[in-house]
Amino acid sequence: MLDPRHIEDWIRAELDCTALTVSGDGRHFEAVIVSPAFAGLSRIERQRRVNAILRPHFESDTLHALSMRCLTPEEAGG
């Protein structure tokens, strides 16, 4: 069963995050990702960026489903 910390590690390895939380049941996960890299990007572009990082894990079915909120530090209140 996949641990949410693995997903956090995969995202942090390729994206500068000021805050990141992932929770889930081993198959379906939710993430809140706060990164300055999201500045100027639409909601869809932000999610595409994270999906590109996680693509190998989706393709291998290690990761089945992830819903996410992608925010800039300003949007997150920081």
Image (cartoon, rainbow, N blue to C red):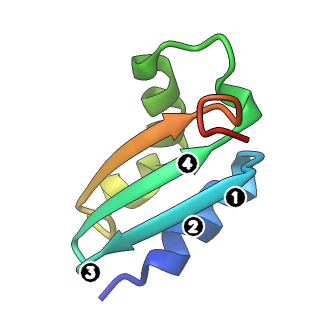
Against 45, residue 30 (above or below) is below
Spot occupied by residue 45 in the image (x, y as percentages of width and height): 48, 19
Numbered circle sitting on residue 33:
4
Question: Is 1 or 76 nearer to us in this picture?
Answer: 76
Residue under label 2, please give it: 8
Q: Indicate the amino acid at tag 4.
A: Ile
How crowded pointer 2 is (Cα within 10 Å; few <14, some 14-19, many 20+) is rated as some
Quadrant of the rendered image containing residue 63: bottom left
Badge 3 element: loop
Q: Indicate the amino acid at tag 3.
A: Gly
The structure residue drawn at horizontal position 77% and vertical position 46%, both measured from the top left corner, is 16
How crowded pointer 4 is (Cα within 10 Å; few <14, some 14-19, many 20+) is rated as many
Against 46, residue 27 (above or below) is below
Residue under label 3, please give it: 26
Marks 3, 4: nearer the viewer: 4
In the image, farthest residue toward the front: 77
Spot occupied by residue 17 in the image (x, y as percentages of width and height): 72, 50
Which comes before the other along the chain, label 2 or label 3? 2
Q: What is the distance, in whole Å, between disc 1 and disc 2 at their CAs? A: 6 Å
The structure residue drawn at horizontal position 36% and vertical position 82%, both measured from the top left corner, is 2
Q: What is the distance, in whole Å, between disc 2 and disc 3 at their CAs? A: 13 Å
In the image, farthest residue toward the bottom: 1
Q: Are marks 3 and 1 in contact (CB under 8 Å)?
A: no
Residue under label 1, please give it: 12
Which comes before the other along the chain, label 3 or label 4? 3
Q: Indicate the amino acid at tag 2.
A: Glu
Q: What is the distance, in whole Å, between disc 2 and disc 4 at their CAs? A: 9 Å
Q: Are marks 1 and 2 in contact (CB under 8 Å)?
A: yes
Badge 2 element: helix
Q: What is the distance, in whole Å, between disc 4 and disc 1 at their CAs? A: 10 Å
